[in-house]
Image (tube, grey):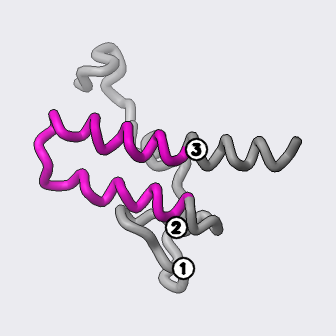
Amino acid sequence: MDQEYPDREDQDLDPERTAGRAPADPDTPTLAGGLPPTGDNRVDEAVAGLSRLPGRPADEHVAVLEEVHGRLRDILGELNEGAS
């Protein structure tokens, strides 16, 4: 049985966990973590910060995630200002 839903013995969570991912295309370049490029270099550079997570202790993950989130929020803010 699965711990998440103990009454569902037949559940298969793998499709749910990968549903948002595009199929792998060997001709598509990938960023750190196997993510496809977004088309915006600023976003790609921010997301590349996630490559610092593997091998770090879990208590250091928050700082890395907050930094990446802050950079992405700044980029969105710049885009929002340009749309006004």
Mark 2 residue type: Pro
**Residue where numbered disc 2 is placed:** 36
Q: Are marks 2 and 1 in contact (CB under 8 Å)?
A: yes
Q: Quadrant of residue 37?
A: bottom right
Q: Secondary structure at mark 1?
A: loop
Q: Secondary structure at mark 3?
A: helix
Q: Does residue 59 sit above or below 68 in this rendering?
A: above
Residue drawn 63% across and 65% down?
A: 40
Chief secondary structure of the magenta span?
helix
Q: Which of pointers 2 and 1 lies earlier in the amino acid sequence?
A: 1
Q: Which mark is residue 28?
A: 1
What whole-number distance in Å separates the C-alpha atoms at marks 2 and 1? Answer: 7 Å
Q: Which of pointers 3 and 1 lies earlier in the amino acid sequence?
A: 1
Binning the other alpha carbons within 10 Å of mark 2 as few (below 14), some (14 to 19) or many (20 upward) gives: some
**Residue where numbered disc 3 is placed:** 74
Magenta span: 43-72
Binning the other alpha carbons within 10 Å of mark 1 as few (below 14), some (14 to 19) or many (20 upward) gives: few
Q: Quadrant of the N terminus?
A: top left
Mark 1 residue type: Thr
Q: Secondary structure at mark 2?
A: loop
Viewer-proximal residue, 65 or 35? 65
Q: Which of labels 2 and 3 is toward the front?
A: 3
Asked whether, in this view, residue 44 is left or right of residue 5, the answer is: right
What whole-number distance in Å separates the C-alpha atoms at marks 3 and 1? Answer: 27 Å
Viewer-proximal residue, 17 or 32? 32
